[in-house]
Image (cartoon, rainbow, N blue to C red):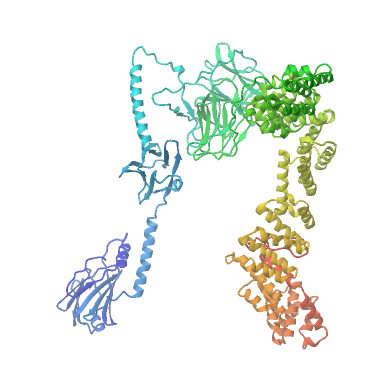
């Protein structure tokens, strides 16, 4: 097809694009061969003649009309004869001759005509149009057009299947706003071919392949006057054009698979270029100076080694490390050198495991799962020492990974490992690994958030003098290790979990267990930065360190005056100081009263000291605003338990960085259980305690040890306990210290030692410590299964009676409430939680307990856990403890669940009132309509159809889920039927099918006394039950009886006979046999028993039967039967709404 038509006088050829395309498609992939003429036919109709040629393949016919002879050439030799054309077209043709070679026809035309040729696949139509033809050429036959369209669609589908359109991979464009520029970053796929270059005043990035640029990230974040981005894509490439605004310029850079566009204001770009030129000149001058012979190069040992970075865990081998260039300084200046670290004190090797080195290497020591890993960064060989004591057992030989050598040791229970620098013979750079019960002082590292320039989350840890980072494969876990050059211990005190990684406890260096494949660990000049591509999902990091504290000069509480005030006759001392303050003049009275307050505070007279301070502040404004007055007042308030007031006294701006004020704030926080705040304060101010009186030291150090324990820092807790040996603890403080040690044993799984210590304290300790020990011992014994839940509850109940006040009472109440929850004593549990709220609702323990109680309340009504509660218990619990009900949508769901319980108890009015309040005040949209459906059910059960109809009509929405619309229609129809609006009720459920709709329709007809239709409807409910041969159940027999009554009342003998024929056998053996026999007998309505039978059938509860079918269809959305315990169906039907 598609060959050119030779034109001549009276010849016209109409092209057909569909036929042309089809011919091309048909020819795809087929070998060339001669076409065969299968048939030639002529038709004379509608004022013109048509000759139809049919070939076995597409052929193009050339037509030429000359001197009354139409020559049709198709270039193929054919054998088919055209002899019948003359007889078929006698008004147009007089003779037809086939060319001898079979490649064409010659037709003698007896009248003037115009020729129109149309090609359609294997068919060619030659139309002979008379001279009078003035309209458009005749179209192709409809069936031919339809066949061409079908074949074209099929061919197009084949083409698409052979050459499917490529799926384009989107490439994101990231935006980062920096102080001096805006940066666009495109991360290219690995190995992609891309070019960047200017294009008409803009910059174009072109990448080969099926890609597209996603600009959604840039929308709203890039000012229109700054730059305009345009993305394009064709079959082979994708392009991104960045056109800078008039006041801006764009520079590009490419680093491996990353392309960066920097958009800078033109004045900043000019300044940057000028600075670069000056820097180049300065660099040339410096190079010339260094080239002089007198210049001595800097020793290599003094140059800072390059920092190292641990690559992503999924990118390279475990040992791979990559250099990270140091941060560049200003042009023309040298990078600052880190100050040399001080040398460690001289110490000879002891009895531990000694590792000698010619030069002391960077090191890391961390622990995981009872196994300590020691890592040295050195090129020297590392051998496992043969001597040493302390019970350390090596797990295998040293393993070298790149520049790191790792050794692993099993840590004995209750043993602490330390690493100290020592001198061992000629080896000046040795390390000694020791095991013992105590550790030296160390720096605790805390992670902080450190977002990058693009706002992606990162975490920084301030590790002093970090060396390099590398990945180790330990027991199948990928752990990044950063060694440290510092000889002073600095590490992570306890395990800290994040979403993407976990910081392991370490004594030296850092160890991170990776949870993400693309985690990066990068040592920097002042610490280690942890991140990943796209940013970390940081869930919890410590707050950044606070501003450094001021130097502590004169303390408000000093050791010598405090201890002197406690000597001799204290009463006489106080009386003398009181008299001196009274006799003094107004100008000198203030300092004397401060002295008196210190004496009173030193001797345990905190309320009296507080009164003295109030009097001094009232008389002397300078005393009132003084630092010592505030700290003494805070100490007195803390001593009598008024910790919130103590914090307010110390919250002034002038005392924010005062070490002594921070210390007493920590004391106040610790005494109310704000352990994290207390620990932060103690870590910053414990050196201040060294100057305090020994008795006060013992009190504060005991609280500090408890603070470290509560925050999970067991090592620090033990260290602070050990420092108490130099103080003067009271018997209570000694018992509190013993309690701390017992809790450490509990935390380290030394259960027997912890239980023994708790038992001893509970029997012979001071009462506060004894109560706390009895509580913790009981809970630990229950947790380990040594006592039953009943025994544990009995112990705590007796303890709750004998001890009141403080955090101990809160903890006893919380422990008892949790035991009640686990035992299913929910009323007792909620009562205990309410008591804890009344005692101290601000305590962290109480707030956590209240949250647990709310979660339990939620579970009791919205989860299978509440199925064990009876309906009465569930309703009573709600109304007695509804202050624990959740808020928002969960609370609304609890209310609806309670309504179901109330219906099961036949308390319809309260249930309806709950749902009505939800509809009027809480819900909107489809959920409101769904709850109104439940309310309508309750109203129908309560015999209030008008209120049911109002509930349905008042919550109508035009667009509701189909199931919800159907459920509402059924209930609406039932309400209308009860209101005697039969026709409207039947119209409401017209077209509805299903057992529930069929029963409702039967009930409506029965209520309307439309007996014949009611009988047929009840008979239809029975279906093929008469064929099954099974005994009919109560519901089926009731339907048979009602159908018989309806047929009798309608005087419908045909229906009654049909019913008798179907069910006589099934009813003969049932309890209703005599009733059925009476109903199917002749003139049943005139017999004495008929009226009684009809009365019973009329009074039957048809609503219950209908709602039973309704619950089968919607088991999760319908209410339980009235006055029956709630039973959930096993079906999983979709609930309405």
Is 549 or 295 nearer to us in this picture? 549
Q: Position of residue 1133 (x, y in %)?
A: 64, 62
Q: Position of residue 546 (x, y in %)?
A: 60, 30
Q: Residue at x 33, y 20 (%)?
A: 285
Q: Is residue 148 above or below residue 442?
A: below
Whether residue 438 is visible: no
Whether residue 116 is visible: yes
Q: Position of residue 944 (x, y in %)?
A: 73, 70
Q: Which quarter of the rendered picture does the N terminus lie within?
A: bottom left
Most extreme residue toward the left, as rendered? Answer: 67
Q: Is residue 281 above or below residue 152?
A: above
Is 796 or 435 nearer to us in this picture? 796
Is residue 366 rendered to the left or right of residue 737?
left
Is residue 66 rendered to the left or right of residue 849?
left
Is 374 or 216 nearer to us in this picture? 216
Q: Which quarter of the rendered picture does the C terminus lie within?
A: bottom right
Is 507 or 638 nearer to us in this picture? 638
Q: Position of residue 428 (x, y in %)?
A: 55, 13
Quadrant housing residue 1128: bottom right
Q: Residue at x 74, y 65 (%)?
A: 1121
Most extreme residue toward the front, as rendered? Answer: 585
Question: How many numbered discs, if any?
Answer: 0
Quadrant housing residue 871: bottom right
């Amino acid at each position: 097809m598609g060959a050119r038509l030779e034109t001549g006088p009276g010849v016209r050829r109409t092209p057909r694009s569909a036929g042309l395309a089809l011919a091309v498609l048909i020819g795809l992939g087929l070998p060339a061969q001669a076409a065969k003429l299968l048939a030639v036919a002529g038709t004379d109709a509608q004022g013109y003649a048509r000759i139809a040629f049919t070939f076995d393949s597409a052929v193009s016919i050339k037509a030429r009309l000359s001197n009354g002879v139409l020559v049709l050439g198709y270039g193929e030799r054919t054998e088919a004869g055209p002899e019948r054309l003359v007889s078929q077209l006698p008004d147009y043709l007089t003779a037809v001759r086939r060319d001898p070679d079979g490649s064409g026809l010659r037709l003698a035309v007896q009248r003037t005509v115009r020729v129109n040729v149309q090609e359609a696949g294997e068919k060619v139509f030659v139309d002979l149009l008379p001279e009078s033809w003035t309209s458009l050429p005749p179209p192709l036959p409809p069936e031919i057009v339809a066949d061409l369209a079908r074949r074209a669609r099929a061919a197009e589908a084949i083409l698409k299947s052979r050459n499917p359109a490529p799926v384009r991979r989107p490439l994101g464009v990231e935006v980062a706003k920096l102080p001096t520029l805006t940066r666009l970053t495109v991360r290219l796929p690995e190995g992609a071919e891309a070019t960047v270059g200017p294009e008409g005043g803009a910059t174009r990035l072109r990448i080969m392949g099926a890609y597209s640029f996603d600009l959604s990230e840039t929308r709203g974040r890039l000012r229109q006057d700054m730059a305009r981005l345009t993305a394009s894509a064709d079959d082979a490439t994708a392009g991104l054009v960045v056109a800078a605004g008039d006041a801006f310029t764009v520079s590009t850079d490419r680093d491996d698979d990353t392309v960066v566009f920097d958009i800078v204001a033109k004045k900043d770009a000019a300044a940057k270029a000028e600075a670069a030129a000056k820097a180049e000149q300065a660099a040339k001058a410096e190079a010339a100076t260094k080239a002089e012979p007198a210049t001595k190069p800097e020793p290599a040992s003094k140059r800072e080694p390059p920092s190292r970075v641990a690559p992503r865990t999924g990118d390279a081998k475990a040992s791979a490390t990559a250099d990270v260039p140091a941060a560049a300084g200003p042009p023309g200046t040298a990078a600052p050198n880190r100050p040399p670290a001080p040398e460690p004190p001289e110490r000879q090797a002891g009895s531990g495991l000694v590792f000698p080195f010619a030069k002391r290497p960077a090191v890391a020591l961390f622990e995981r799962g009872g196994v300590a890993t020691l890592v040295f960064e050195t090129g020297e060989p590392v051998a496992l020492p043969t001597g040493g004591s302390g019970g350390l057992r090596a797990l295998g030989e040293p393993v070298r990974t790149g520049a790191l050598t790792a050794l692993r040791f099993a840590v004995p229970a209750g043993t602490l490992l330390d690493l100290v620098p020592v001198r061992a013979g000629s080896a000046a750079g040795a390390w000694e690994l020791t095991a013992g019960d105590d550790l030296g002082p160390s720096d605790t590292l805390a992670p902080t958030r450190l977002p990058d320039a693009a706002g992606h989350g990162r975490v920084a840890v301030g590790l002093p003098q970090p060396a390099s980072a590398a990945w180790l494969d330990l027991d199948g876990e990928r752990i990044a290790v950063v060694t440290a050059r510092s000889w002073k211990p600095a590490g992570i005190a306890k395990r800290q979990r994040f979403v993407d990684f976990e910081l392991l406890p370490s004594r030296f260096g850092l160890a991170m267990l990776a949870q993400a494949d693309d985690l990066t660990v990068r040592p920097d000049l002042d610490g280690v930065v942890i991140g990943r591509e796209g940013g970390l999902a940081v869930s919890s990091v410590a707050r950044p360190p606070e501003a450094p504290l001021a130097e502590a000069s004169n303390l408000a509480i000093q050791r010598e005056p405090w201890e002197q005030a406690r000597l001799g006759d204290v009463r006489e001392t106080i009386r003398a100081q009181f008299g001196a303050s009274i006799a003094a003049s107004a100008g000198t009275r203030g300092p004397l009263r401060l002295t008196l307050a210190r004496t009173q505070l030193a001797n345990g007279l905190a309320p009296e000291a507080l009164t003295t301070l109030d009097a001094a502040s009232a008389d002397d404004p300078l005393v009132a605003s003084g630092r010592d007055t505030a700290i003494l007042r805070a100490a007195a308030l803390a001593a009598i338990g008024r910790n919130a007031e103590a914090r307010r006294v110390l919250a002034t701006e002038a005392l924010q960085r005062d070490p002594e004020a921070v210390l007493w704030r920590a004391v106040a926080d610790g005494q109310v259980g704000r352990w994290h705040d207390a620990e932060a304060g103690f870590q910053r101010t414990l050196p201040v305690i060294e100057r305090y009186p020994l008795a006060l030291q013992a009190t504060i150090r005991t609280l500090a040890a408890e603070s470290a324990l509560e925050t999970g820092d067991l090592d620090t807790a033990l260290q602070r306990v050990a420092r108490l040996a130099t103080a003067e603890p009271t018997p209570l403080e000694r018992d509190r210290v013993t309690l701390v040690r017992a809790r450490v044993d509990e935390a380290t799984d030394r259960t027997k030692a912890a239980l023994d210590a708790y038992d001893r304290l509970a029997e012979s300790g001071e009462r506060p410590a004894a109560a706390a020990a009895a509580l913790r011992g009981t809970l630990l014994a229950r947790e380990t299964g040594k006592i039953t839940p009943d025994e544990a509850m009995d112990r705590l109940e007796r303890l709750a009676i004998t001890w009141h006040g403080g955090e101990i009472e809160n903890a006893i109440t919380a422990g008892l409430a949790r035991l009640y929850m686990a035992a299913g004593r929910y009323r007792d549990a909620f009562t205990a939680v309410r008591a804890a709220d009344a005692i101290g609702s601000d305590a962290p323990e109480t707030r956590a307990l209240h949250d647990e109680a709310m979660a339990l309340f939620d579970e009791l009504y919205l989860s299978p856990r509440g199925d064990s509660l009876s309906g009465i218990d569930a309703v009573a619990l709600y109304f007695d403890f509804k202050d624990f009900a959740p808020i928002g949508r969960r609370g609304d769901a609890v209310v609806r669940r309670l309504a179901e319980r109330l219906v099961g108890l036949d308390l319809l009015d309260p249930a309806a009132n709950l749902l009505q309040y939800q509809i009027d005040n809480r819900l909107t949209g489809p959920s409101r309509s769904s709850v109104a459906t439940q309310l309508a059910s309750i109203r129908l059960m309560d015999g209030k159809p008008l209120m049911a109809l109002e509930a349905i009509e008042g919550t109508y929405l035009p667009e509701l889920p189909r199931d919800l619309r159907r459920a509402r229609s059924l209930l609406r129809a039932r309400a209308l039927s009860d209101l005697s609006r039969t026709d409207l009720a039947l119209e409401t459920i017209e077209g509805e099918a299903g057992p529930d709709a069929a029963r409702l329709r039967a009930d409506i007809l029965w209520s309307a006394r439309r007996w014949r239709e009611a009988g047929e409807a009840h008979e239809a409910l029975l279906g093929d039950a008469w064929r099954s041969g099974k005994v009919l159940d109560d519901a089926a027999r009731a339907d048979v009886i009602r159908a018989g009554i309806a047929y009798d009342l309608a005087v419908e003998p045909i229906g009654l006979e049909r019913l008798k024929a179907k069910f006589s056998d099934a009813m003969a053996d049932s309890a209703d046999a005599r009733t059925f026999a009476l109903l199917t007998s002749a003139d049943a309505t005139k017999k004495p028993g008929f009226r009684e039978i009809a009365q019973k059938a009329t009074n039957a509860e048809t609503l219950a039967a209908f709602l039973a079918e309704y619950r089968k269809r919607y088991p999760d959305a319908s209410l339980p039967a009235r006055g029956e315990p709630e039973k959930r169906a096993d079906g999983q039907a979709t609930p309405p709404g």
